[in-house]
Image: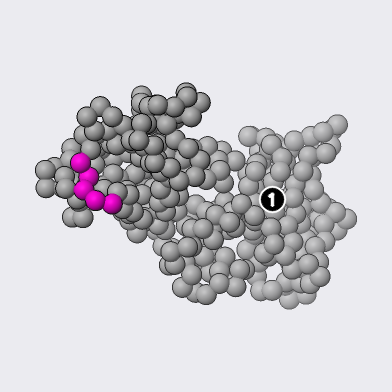
Amino acid sequence: MIRSLITGLVAAVAVCTATAARAELTLCNRTSYRMDVALGLEKRANVETRGWFTVDPGQCKQVIDGAYDADMSYIHVRTPKVYGSAPLPQNGNSDFCVRDGNFQISDGRGCPINQQVRFSAARPSDSPKGPAINLAEEADYDDDQARLAGIQRLLVIAGYDANPIDGVQGAKTQGAIARFLADRKLPADAASGADFFTTLINAAQNPEGHGFAWCNDTTYPVMAAIGTTEAGAIITRGWYRVEAGQCVRPELRGDPKKLYSYAEAVDDGGRAIKRGGTALAWGGTVPLCTRDGRFELSDNKDCAARGLNAANFAEVDLGREPATTIRFKEP
């Protein structure tokens, strides 16, 4: 589950102008989350609800065929479970009916309480295409930035390092997208396709099966280190932080057939978690060097004599199992 989510997401609210009153209603998602939206339309004290409308980051979707003539609009938003807690606070005070799957309910108040959810008022603003309800977050993305930030967020959840999630197309994000496409043998233009967010969500929900990854099934943060053979020597690198419930794919140089993995659980202060006086760690029988803080070491002999820490790494045969995931579990 995502531990820290952007707060302050709001449904952008503005007064609907007369020029837009006869046009179709559009939902525009300027957040970095895919959203499923239920819509409530109030006219002469009756509320009709309909949904679910899936709107990807950076996408605008028409949600009413024909003229928008409601006196008031309401929305309820949910996100796929892969994101963790819902990022958009449901701070409204109106409870209306919804159903699973596609629905249109003419009497949005006429159902049992357990079939109602909290809706927030959202008056559409005017846009060149007519009235639009804009879903926005604190970062205030435009459409293109929201799409890229949404891609970054799902890449990170799937284990690819596309941080920071900022909607900026830097070299790090480009590299993460390229690795994702290569791992799944997708064409270079797949990232601009209409179904790319579905592909990303499927990958985030099922991170195993492509390349090497660590997945943390514990309730603690885990710090991991990797060793790869380069020019005949083992190079160790670390630390990679793997949050509880998440996966990380460390960047591998070249196409290694063998690598080495070590990891240990830590508390919020970075101290090793111990069980029965022994660190909660995942390794093997190959002694290699690490150090406190970020490191890259090419000499793995006499660790203690050089002021380094020795750790027993597990050998991972990628030649036999190129799609390998190491899952950290508590005993």
| Residue extent of the magenta highlight | 65-69
- Secondary structure of the residue carrying tag 1 is strand
Which residue is at the front of the view, 308 or 108?
108
Left or right: where 194 falls relative to 297: left
Q: Is residue 292 visible?
A: no
Q: Does residue 67 show up magenta in the picture?
A: yes
x and y, in percent, of residue 148 in the image: 42, 58
Task: Classify residue 299 as left or right of residue 50.
Answer: right
Which residue does the numbered mark 1 point to in the structure image?
Answer: 215
Q: Quadrant of the C terminus?
A: top right
Could you tell me what secondary structure mostly forms the magenta stretch? Answer: loop
Q: Is residue 51 above or below residue 149?
A: above
Does residue 79 belong to the magenta stretch?
Answer: no
Please tell me which residue is depicted at 40% across the width and 57% down the height of the picture: 147
Q: Position of residue 319 (x, y in %)?
A: 79, 72
Residue ID at (73%, 38%) = 272
Side of 167 where 84 appears, left or right: right
Residue 130 spot, x, y in % from top left: 20, 51
Amino acid tagged 1: Cys
* Colour basis: one colour
Q: Could you say which quadrant of the image residue 211 lies in?
A: bottom right
Report how many numbered discs are placed on residues in the image. 1
Can you say whether 72 is above or below 148 in the image? above
Foreground residue among 160 and 276: 160
Q: Residue at x 52, y 45 (%)?
A: 80
Neighbours of disc 1 within 10 Å: few (<14), some (14-19), many (20+): many
Residue 44 visible in the picture: yes
Q: Residue at x 35, y 40 (%)?
A: 39
Q: Residue furthest left?
A: 18
Q: Which quadrant of the figure contains the N terminus?
A: top right
In this picture, residue 192 sits left or right of residue 180 = left
Q: Provide residue 229's location: percent of width, then percent of height.
A: 75, 70
